[in-house]
Image (cartoon, rainbow, N blue to C red):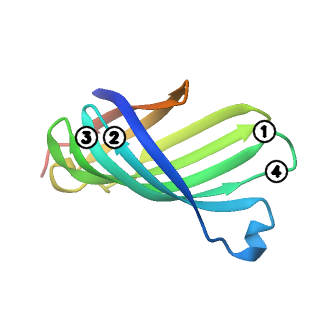
Amino acid sequence: MPRVSGPFEVTLKPLQMDDDLASQLMARMSIDKQYRGDLEATGKGQMLTGGSSIRNSAAYVAIERVTGTLKGKKGGFTLVHTGLMNRGSPSLVITIVPDSGTDQLEGLKGTMTINIEAGRHSYQLDYTLADRV
């Protein structure tokens, strides 16, 4: 399975939340990303977070639309993020939404991992690209 990796920058901004939900340790944010490397693209999306009264336990879900080039192929695709923090133990699954690839990325499938070290973000994308029919 092909793999690409590189750095990215991310900006999260709080968005208005329904008052009833905001009072329940929930929040909503916009996501703006700039991917570098073999994935030269922008990512735009929204994230919902849910906290807990237990320290270091929380969750987030997000939908992100990525548009640009993947190893020179132009197009876009959608990522779905599911993240959990269980008393400090993290797990994160980021998957390309089936059939969301467009243009030269039609048929794209795969998963992404995110690494954060010393405040710097990087991605690793494992993918397959089906031949166009």
The numbered disc on residue 52 is 4
Question: Separation of disc 2 and disc 4 at Cα?
Answer: 31 Å
Q: Residue at x 61, y 62 (%)?
A: 28
For badge 2, the amino acid type reads: Tyr
Q: Which mark is residue 35?
A: 2
Residue at (52, 48) in percent of width and height:
81
Q: Can residue 1 be seen here? A: no
Q: Earlier in the sequence, mark 3 or mark 1?
A: 3
At horizontal 39% and vertical 37% (from top left) the residue drawn is 8
Q: Residue at x 31, y 56 (%)?
A: 99
According to the picture, the residue beneath numbered tag 1 turns out to be 56
Q: Residues within 10 Å of mark 2 (few under 14, many from 20)?
A: many
Q: Secondary structure at mark 4?
A: loop
Please provide percent x and percent y for residue 122.
43, 30
* Image quarter of the N terminus: top left
Q: Amino acid at mark 1?
A: Asn
Task: Tell which circle, 2 or 4, labels the residue nearer the N-terminal end.
Answer: 2
Mark 4 residue type: Ser
Q: Position of residue 60 (x, y in %)?
A: 63, 51
In depth, the one of 91 and 108 nearer the eye is 91
Position of 29 relative to 36 (above/below) = below
Say which amino acid is labelled 3. Answer: Glu
The residues bearing labels 3 and 1 have C-alpha atoms spaced at a distance of 33 Å
- For the residues labelled 4 and 3, the Cα–Cα distance comes to 36 Å
